Image: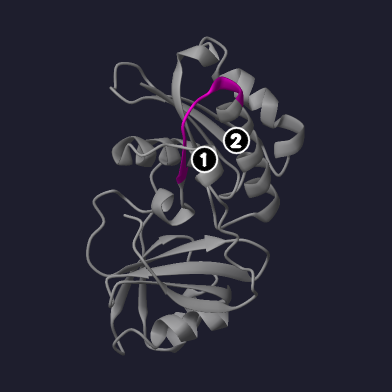
């Protein structure tokens, strides 16, 4: 089955077309910046140039957190396509898109939104814990749940929070993300999960609203 995936939360708006059976190479494209509204449909046309929409079996979309405007645009496009073509829609969180499928143990995944603001999900310490806010707020909330002097594997961009974590005795080890546009990671996660359904059930995670919030969360893995 072909999966069409869209993402606007993790930087530039991106689109990927992936064969769930692995019979053909993925197609992917992304805008050059924050121009999802201006170039988003053009990117979709580019990826679907040789594939009629009727050949697509399901749509996947990044549900955030991340960039507010890009997230809203990607969700709007994905839901419109799913409704128009009668296709199931799967939502994939930005955290899941940035984490390797084989990730285990204790780690944190960072997602950036507005300047100076980020969200993080800590895995492997009494379940999953998510926090959004300033870099200082993130570092404080995470350090409270980690033994002093411990090493923390980080996915996504921990650049803003890493110095603040270091000041609190946490050693940050950043792991590069897989190459490819974010929509490609969204598609691959959706294929493994295989759960796509009613487009109405897919909702956005705007993360940074309210400005600072810390909460335990059920793992979506």
Q: Callout 2: helix, strand or loop?
A: helix
Tag count: 2
Disc 2 to disc 1, how far (Cα)? 9 Å
Residue 157, magenta (yes or no): no
As drawn, 49 above or below 130: above
178 or 86, which is in the foreground? 86
Q: Position of residue 46 (x, y in %)?
A: 60, 19
Viewport quadrant of the N terminus: top left
> Residue at the right extreme?
38
Q: Is residue 87 magenta?
A: yes
Look at the image and tell me whether residue 159 can be seen.
no
**Residue 114: mark:** none
The x and y percentages for residue 157 are 49, 61
Please tell me how crowded label 2 is: few (under 14), some (14-19), or many (20+) other residues with Cα within 10 Å: many
Q: Earlier in the sequence, mark 2 or mark 1?
A: 1
Q: Which residues, given as a range, are shown in magenta? A: 84-91
Q: Is residue 52 above or below residue 174?
A: above
Residue at x-position 70% and y-position 38%: 36
Q: Could you tell me which residue is drawn at 48 percent across and 81 percent down?
A: 139
Q: Are marks 2 and 1 in contact (CB under 8 Å)?
A: yes
- Nearer-the-camera pick, 11 or 51: 51
Q: In percent of the image, x 46 and y 76: which residue is there?
A: 215
Residue where numbered disc 2 is placed:
79
Give the vertical position of 189 relative to 121 (above or below). above
Residue 79 in sight in this render: yes
Left or right: where 89 falls relative to 143:
right
Can you give x and y, in whole percent of width and height, for residue 59 in the image? 48, 31
For the residues carrying marks 2 and 1, which lies nearer the camera in this image? 2
The residue indicated by pointer 1 is: 61
Q: Secondary structure at mark 1?
A: strand
């Amino acid at each position: 089955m072909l999966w069409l995936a869209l993402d606007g939360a993790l930087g530039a708006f991106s689109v990927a077309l992936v064969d769930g059976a692995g019979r053909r190479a993925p197609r992917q494209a992304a805008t050059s910046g924050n121009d999802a509204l201006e170039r988003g449909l053009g990117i979709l046309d580019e990826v679907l140039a040789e594939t009629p929409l009727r050949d697509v079996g399901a749509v996947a979309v990044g549900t955030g957190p991340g960039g507010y405007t890009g997230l809203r645009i990607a969700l709007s496009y994905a839901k419109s396509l799913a409704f128009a073509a009668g296709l199931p829609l799967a939502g994939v969180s930005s955290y899941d898109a940035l984490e390797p499928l084989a990730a285990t143990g204790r780690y944190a995944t960072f997602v950036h939104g507005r300047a100076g603001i980020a969200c993080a999900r800590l895995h492997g310490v009494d379940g999953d814990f998510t926090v959004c806010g300033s870099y200082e707020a993130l570092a404080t909330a995470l350090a409270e749940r980690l033994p002093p002097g411990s090493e923390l594997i980080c996915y996504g961009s921990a650049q803003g929070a890493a110095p603040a974590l270091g000041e609190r005795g946490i050693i940050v080890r950043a792991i590069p993300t897989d190459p490819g546009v974010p929509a490609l990671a969204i598609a691959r996660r959706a294929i493994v999960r295989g759960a796509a359904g009613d487009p109405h059930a897919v909702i956005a995670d705007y993360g940074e609203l309210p400005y600072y919030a810390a909460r335990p969360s059920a793992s979506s893995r």
